[in-house]
Amino acid sequence: MSKITRPLRSVLYIPGSKDRALDKARGLPADAIIFDLEDAVIPEEKTAARETLATALKDGGYGSRYKVIRINGLDTHYMYRDVVDILEQAPGKLDLIMIPKAGTAADIYAVDMLVTQIEAATKVEKRIGFELIIETALGMMNVDELAASSRRLESLHFGVADYAASTKARTTVIGGPNKDYHVLTDPDGDGNRDVHWGDMWHYPVARMVVAARAHGLRPIDGPFGDFSDPDGFNAQGNRSATLGCEGKWAIHPSQVELANNLFSPSDEDVTKAQRIIEAMEQAQKEGKGAVALDGRLIDIASIKQAEVMVRKAEQIKAAS
Ligand code: GLV
Ligand code: MG
């Protein structure tokens, strides 16, 4: 199974049924495009959407961007046709299938079995990879089992909107903070208290990152609905990047560049990481396991941390 190797910083989400969006995506600098057949397409348009999408995939023009279809959930009767129609009508054109509302390993087996049969029947050599959206209480509870469920898996995505609905979280925004999720400081001498907003998505994102990394998959943060709030997008994206996510969905063209920037290490960070590697190489030559650099301790684990940063920068450079 060939694993996908290029960056996944910006994952552009577009309706698979809209010619204009399908065309516009050809010119946007996204690392991946999700062609949605699920929530962005109303039931009456599912059949037409598959045809429109298959034609767009055959016409091509998406360059090196990863091409992903988001199929409908396994609890609908649309899902099998999404897989069969797109794979048969546009053989070899797709890189990944995104499975929404992944709940148990059996869900993933069902899609895997279907795809394996179609690949065999159509004699397509390229094997399709899978991406899972972790967006239900069941999926989050079973995230380890899901992350180990198929050799086709490439990445896990945090579907914040459905996750909030599934857990009955008290919020109606998509992926933003909530003022009610805060702590109050103790009163100061004058009785004043500060309000510190917390991040209500910290736990699910961190949980998903651990499961993904433990199984060699790439964790990706999902949508941020308020596309007129770039600062809010950056704040959420920075938090998930800090926790280990490799990219974030862009539900609007303006979010593509934001995500590319957020998930590319800065020159300053890369230079610092290179200095750590050099200092540790020197330390090892001198038989030392730990040394000081700029007044801070660095040791063997620091090399590993620094290498993550340097490799990420190399991966991005190689793809550009
Ligand atoms: C994405 O599918 C989400 O529910 O946030
Ligand atoms: Mg969803």
Image (cartoon, helix red, strand yellow):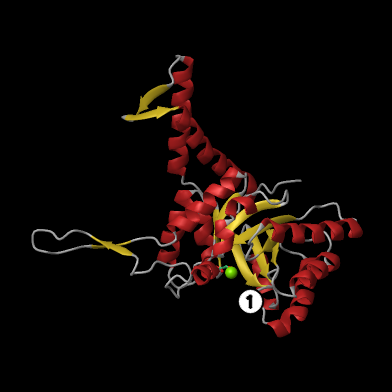
Q: Specify whether 102 is left or right of 88.
A: left
Instruction: Indicate whether 261 appears above or below 298.
Output: below
Which residue is pictured at 62% across the width and 57% down the height? 31
Any part of residue 162 in sight: yes
Residue placed furthest toward the left:
190
Q: Give residue 131's quadrant in the image.
A: bottom right
Residue nearer the viewer, 136 or 46: 136
Q: Which kind of residue does numbered mark 1 sit on?
A: Ala
* Circle 1 crowding by C-alpha within 10 Å: few under 14, some 14–19, many from 20: some
Q: Which residue is mark 1?
A: 40
Q: Secondary structure at mark 1?
A: loop
Q: Quarter for ligand 2?
A: bottom right
Q: Which residue: 37% across, 69% down?
A: 178
Position of residue 122 measured from the top left corner of the image (x, y, whole percent): 90, 60
Would you say residue 65 is visible in this rendering? Answer: no
**At which x and y percent is residue 277?**
48, 29
Instruction: Tell which residue pokes out farthest to the top in this image.
Output: 286
Q: Relative to 96, is 43 above or below?
A: below
